[in-house]
Amino acid sequence: MNLAESIYQHSLNLPEIAAREALDFIEFLEQCYAPVPHNIKQLNDTEAFLAAIVGGLSEDFPDDISDKDLGVDTLREALD
């Protein structure tokens, strides 16, 4: 029996809630130890960050916003 089969066999003895917790932990470990594909840059790299957020605005986002749409700043003294 290999390791994966052993983990599976032990999981059969657990109550449902504990089996779900074990699965969550295994998925967490998978994220920690899974190899990162070499063609993906680190997120701290500016190009990778920009590539990750490209298309973040929906297609219906208005592209005709001008300064007159932003409002006017009020001086603090005028609020007294």
Image (cartoon, rainbow, N blue to C red):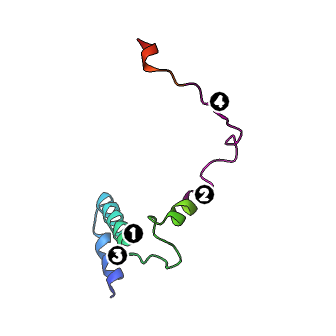
What is the distance, in whole Å, between disc 1 and disc 3 at their CAs?
19 Å
Q: Are marks 1 and 2 in contact (CB under 8 Å)?
A: no
Report which residue position mark 1 lands on: 31
The answer to which of marks 1 and 2 sits earlier in the sequence is 1
Q: Secondary structure at mark 4?
A: helix
Up-down: is 78 above or below 41?
A: above
Q: What residue would you read off at disc 2?
A: 54
On the image, which quarter does residue 26 sit in?
bottom left
Q: Amino acid at mark 1?
A: Gln
Q: Earlier in the sequence, mark 1 or mark 3?
A: 3
Q: Earlier in the sequence, mark 4 or mark 2?
A: 2
* Amino acid of disc 2: Val
Disc 3 marks a residue whose amino acid type is Tyr
Residue 55 pos. (x, y %): 63, 55
Q: CA distance from mark 1 to mark 2?
A: 24 Å
Mark 1 vs mark 2: give the one in front.
2
